[in-house]
Image: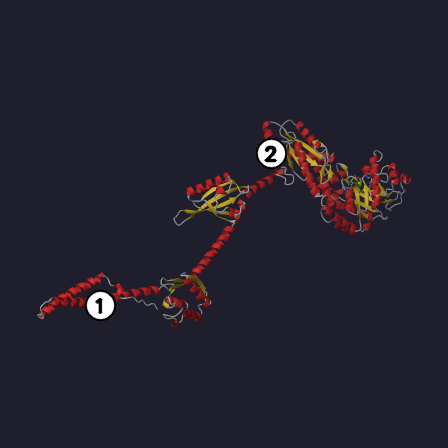
Amino acid sequence: MFRLRKNLGEDSDWRISSLAGLLGFALTAAAMEIVSAYSVPLTTSSIILSAVIGSLLGMSLVAQRSALCVRHKLHEQNKWLDGAINNMIQGLCMFNAQNRLMVWNERYRAMYNIDPRSIWRGCTVQDLLGARIAAGTFPLNPERYEAQLRAALKQDKPFTHTVDLSDGRTVAVVNQPMQGGGWVATHEDITERRRAERELDRTRTFLDTIINNVPSNIIVKELPSLRYLLINKAGEKHFDLPRENMIGRTTAEIFSKGTADLIHQHDLEFLRSGREIISGEHAIITPTGNTRIVTTTRLPVMGEDGRPQYMIVVIDDLTERKRHEQRIVHMAHHDSLTELPNRAAFNECIGATLELAARAGESFAVLCVDLDRFKEVNDVFGYSVGDALLCEAARRLETACQGAFLARVGGDEFSIITPTGLQPATAVILAEQLVAAFDSDIDIEGHPLRVGLTIGVGIYPQDGADAATLIANTDAALSRAKSEARGSIRFFETSMDHQLREKRALQQDLRNAIMRDEIALHYQPQAHIAGDITGFEALVRWHHPRHGLVPPTTFIPLAEESGIIIALGEWVLRSACREAASWPRPLSIAINLSPVQFQHGDLPSLVHQILLETGLPPARLELEITEGVLIGDFTRAVAILRRLKNLGVRIAMDDFGTGYSSLSYLQSFPFDKIKIDRSFIASLNQSQQAATIIRAVIALGRGLDLPVVAEGVETEEQLKFLASESCDEIQGYLIGRPTPIADYADVVGRAPAPWPKDLAAAS
Ligand code: C2E
Ligand code: MG
Ligand code: MG
């Protein structure tokens, strides 16, 4: 417990001396009165004696009085100091130069839970540490602690450290040497402060992490120096510069002059206003030379004096968004492959051109361009070659267009709008330029490809006073050009419109044709080169109530276009199989399949079902397909063909030689037969080339162990040639025309009939 001791004499002052003097004087006077009262003559010595006695008495009285005063005062001071020391929040110990404890407070004792009996005035550091170890409040090594303490004190240096107690408290200890020896030790429980600091640290780290990872670009500048103080990760990325190259620097030291001036101007604007400001869209160039479009928000952080101390700048980088927006606008109007304007852009352009032409009383032309043989290229060489071909075609068209508006409106379809002016002259010149642009081969990945153009032309206002009619009529002109002569240029004619309507009407009639019993099958015999008939090909016929017999070359495309072919094809399959199954002789039956039948429904299951239904042995059925089946989804088509083949039916490649890639298709599927297109047989007597091709195909068939059938054999001469080339089979008017099966009743074994004389002679 604290006890204050003070030297008495130290507190005398002049007032006490004066008081003593006065009292001495009074007492001297009193002594002289007493001496005279006892009739003692007042001699000098008696006067002096009286004065001395009086002074001594006075001094003694005053001294007693002042000692009382001082004691009282000290007591008061002790009380105050005692109160102060014992009410300190720190624990306090004071040691003298002999390392003995002189003063301590209750806080110290309680803080370390020291037994009151183990702490006394004059105890040593060792005693104290022992008491604390016993109380479990000294977790350090006492020898080492003492040694460190002494070493520090010896050098007259404070010895400070923190102690983590086992109960979770942390105490900060400061041992401060005192003048003249000894030291004061303060012990402060900093558990709460530590916790608060840790909390603060955590909060700061948390905030730092957030600011650093926030996807916005954030920088902080110091005011008024405008030096960079902080930059987050996104900001670093934005400026393309590590933060160490920015922090502590000014804008002028980082950016090029133009950008630095602009940023500085915005900073000054902020400084002038002293409050949040937003700088609208502007471009800056990063130190690495990238242009970024940004908006910035500057916010003040106030200092204690109420003035802005820091400036937070939040940068919103719009560059990507802008690019994206531009890209979206571009994509909405452009074809991603060729980068040409798309159909939407074409529609807009035709609307605008039409308005202009109408106002000026001028005309303009629309050209619909179709790339010939594109689908085949795509199919044979793959999509990458197909895409490259489209791009090159687009480039050639663009050059040939010479400024006319060109758009890609479909897979291999392009549309062109000529500027207003003299028509049809301008359109004719343009169309010829386009065709000429495709005169040479297009080399794609080493493949020399030759594609042609088929062009339909419509002219405003005569071929359509509004965009929809003009486009429809131009399309009709293109359709006509495609169906009549690929590679040609066709202008729209009013008759086309009429024909188009007729076509639609015919398509409509076809929908009901099966139901109305207008569809029939004709059968054309197929024979071995020696003459014996091996089977028949079923060929569909349409007896139209008004138009009479419509050829399959006319209505099959109509049926394919409208999807009617699915029902029609099924009808043909079922009828032909039923018919063949009814023949007494087990002749084969060849049935044509449309590519559309491969794209919809489950063809193998249908064939299987029909075979079961009709009882026709699969081996007697031969399905004829053209290249068209394999164009498009090749993998799917081959998979279907395999399933069909697995049923036990045979697959023949029809019209061989007319397609683009007959040879490559032969490699992709094990066909059972090749049918040389009749156009080669028809050309036999006119062209040496035809004979060469036929010879080559027969040789190919032999090589692949595939029977070859020659179609369209009409003459003995043709037959002789084919026989001399060892062609396997023939089909054509020479053997028999396609007619109702009743005409071949004898051949199928229903009724005896004479063998055709002329054929017997030929073989
Ligand atoms: P295709 O399969 O090549 O049929 C052979 C075509 O050649 C038939 O024409 C036939 O009448 C004709 N032809 C046969 N021999 C001769 C001849 O010696 N001289 C001449 N000039 N022509 C001859 P058609 O019947 O007009 O059939 C044309 C095409 O229509 C067929 O060609 C075939 O691709 C298609 N077709 C016919 N029937 C069907 C069918 O049921 N389904 C499908 N998808 N297509 C069919
Ligand atoms: Mg055929
Ligand atoms: Mg054929």
Mark 2 residue crowding within 10 angstroms, few (<14) / some (14–19) / many (20+):
some
Colour mode of the rendering: secondary structure
The residue tagged with tag 2: helix, strand or loop? helix
Q: Residue furthest bottom?
A: 117
For the question of whether residue 210 can be seen, the reply is: yes
**Which disc, if any, is residue 572?**
none
The residue tagged with tag 1: helix, strand or loop? helix
**Which disc, if any, is residue 64?**
1
Vertical position of residue 601 compared to residue 343: above or below: below
Quarter of the image where the C terminus is located: top right
Q: Which residue is mark 2?
A: 351
Mark 1 residue crowding within 10 angstroms, few (<14) / some (14–19) / many (20+):
few
The residue lying toward the viewer, choosing from 699 and 506, is 699
For the question of whether residue 511 can be seen, the reply is: no
Residue 464: x and y in percent read: 64, 32
Which quarter holds ligand 1? top right
Image quadrant in which you'd find residue 559: top right
Residue at 21 percent across and 61 percent down: it is 15
Horizontal relation, residue 81 to residue 257: left or right = left
Vertical position of residue 13 compared to residue 700: above or below: below
- Mark 2 and 1 residues: CB-CB less than 8 Å, in contact? no
Q: CA distance from mark 2 to mark 1?
A: 125 Å
